[in-house]
């Protein structure tokens, strides 16, 4: 049984920004776009949220750093040569 406690922090931020300038954000498994008034601020909030969730679930800072390094490696590979 799943109990819903209402909108999440992220959804509340999303709802507050509805109707503002939109920046397309690719989502896994969905071609939808999400309205974001300030993409840089949205990334900061998302980063802090992910970090907090990982720490609350028992991940150590070194493990989170390894995850971040792996993500950077994947993005670097995806970008390809910058020549």
Image (cartoon, rainbow, N blue to C red):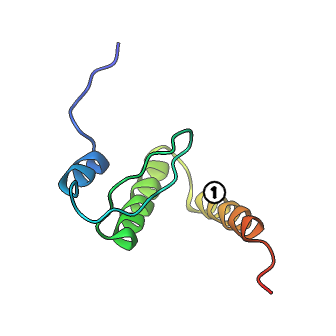
Q: Residue 78, how many percent across, how many down? A: 73, 64
Q: Can you say which quadrant of the picture contains the N terminus?
A: top left
Q: Quadrant of residue 40?
A: bottom left
Question: Which residue is labeled 1 in the image?
Answer: 63
Q: Nearer the viewer, residue 18 or 55?
A: 18
Residue 73 in the image, given as x and y percentages of width and height: 73, 66
Between residue 66 and residue 58, name the one nearer to us.
Answer: 66
Question: For the view shown, which residue lies furthest in the top direction?
Answer: 1
At x 41% / y 59%, what residue is drawn? Answer: 46
Dot 1 surroundings within 10 Å: few (below 14), some, or many (20 or more)? few
Q: Residue at x 38, y 69 (%)?
A: 39
Q: Is residue 58 above or below residue 16?
A: above
Residue at 27% in and 42% down: 8
Q: In the picture provided, is 13 more to the left or to the right than 32?
A: left
Q: Name the residue rendered at 36%, 64% in the picture.
A: 42
Residue 81 image offset from top left, x and y in percent: 81, 78
In the displayed orientation, state which residue is furthest to the bottom.
83
In which quadrant of the rendered image does the C terminus lie?
bottom right
Percent coordinates x, y for residue 44 in the rendering: 39, 68
Q: How many marks?
A: 1
Front one among 49 and 11: 11
Which of the two residues, 38 or 45, is positioned nearer the viewer here? 38
Mark 1 element type? helix
Is 60 situated left or right of 15 in this image? right
């Amino acid at each position: 049984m799943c109990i819903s406690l209402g909108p999440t922090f992220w959804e509340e931020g999303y709802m507050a920004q509805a109707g503002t300038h939109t920046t397309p954000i690719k989502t896994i498994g969905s071609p939808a776009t999400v309205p974001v008034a300030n993409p840089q601020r949205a990334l900061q909030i998302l980063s802090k949220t992910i970090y907090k969730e990982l720490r609350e679930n028992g991940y150590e800072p070194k493990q989170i750093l390894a995850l971040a390094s792996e993500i950077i490696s994947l993005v670097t590979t995806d970008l390809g040569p910058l020549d």
